[in-house]
Amino acid sequence: MKYLKKDNEKTREHTKDMEADIEEMKETNHRLVEASASAGASLDSLEKQRARIAEHNAKLEENLKKYSDQNKQLEKDLANRQAYFEAENKIKRDYEKAMEKIVDLMEDKCDDSDLVERIMTAQLTCTTNNLNRLGGF
């Protein structure tokens, strides 16, 4: 009987130890369940954020393409305007050279100094007006 009491006591101690282990496991399990729920919520939040960012990036890619095309068009427009400006500038230079030749010819061939003076004044006025209008170009 003594043996059975001792064995019973050992079994009870072992049971108490196992019950303590079970309680500890329940607490650990509870913490793990909470951590898992928290991680799941974080994962859901991150997934939603990833989807929003992906959508935003797609819109940015569309805008990039659109703006890139617009830049190409602006570059073409700029090239056309530069060509136009250069052509206009050449015409202006040719006109000024022609006017200089006319004034030189008038000075050499014309006996009417008043007419020569009026032509030179007109030439100077045109040149001054062009410089003022173009800002000195």
Image (cartoon, rainbow, N blue to C red):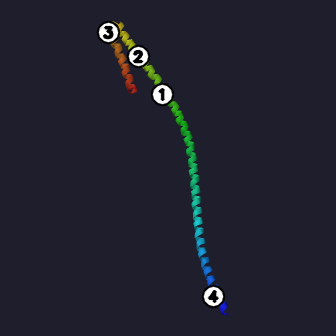
Q: Badge 3: how crowded within 10 Å, few (<14), some, or many (20+)?
A: few
Residue 41 location (% of width, % of height): 58, 62
Identify residue type, mark 3: Ser
- Give the residue pinned by disc 2: 97
Task: Kindly report the distance in space between the C-alpha atoms of the residues bearing marks 2 and 4.
Answer: 126 Å
Work out whether 111 lies above or below 38.
Answer: above
- Give the residue pinned by disc 3: 113
Q: Residue at x 55, y 42 (%)?
A: 63
Identify residue type, mark 1: Gln
Name the foreground residue: 26 vs 69.
26
Name the foreground residue: 28 vs 51.
28
Q: Earlier in the sequence, mark 3 or mark 2?
A: 2
Residue 89 location (% of width, % of height): 44, 23
Q: Badge 1: how crowded within 10 Å, few (<14), some, or many (20+)?
A: few
Task: Kindly report the distance in space between the C-alpha atoms of the residues bearing marks 1 and 2.
Answer: 22 Å
Identify the element where label 1 is drawn. Answer: helix
Picture disc at residue 9: 4
Name the foreground residue: 128 vs 25.
25
Task: Kindly report the distance in space between the C-alpha atoms of the residues bearing marks 3 and 2.
Answer: 21 Å
Q: Residue at x 36, y 19 (%)?
A: 125
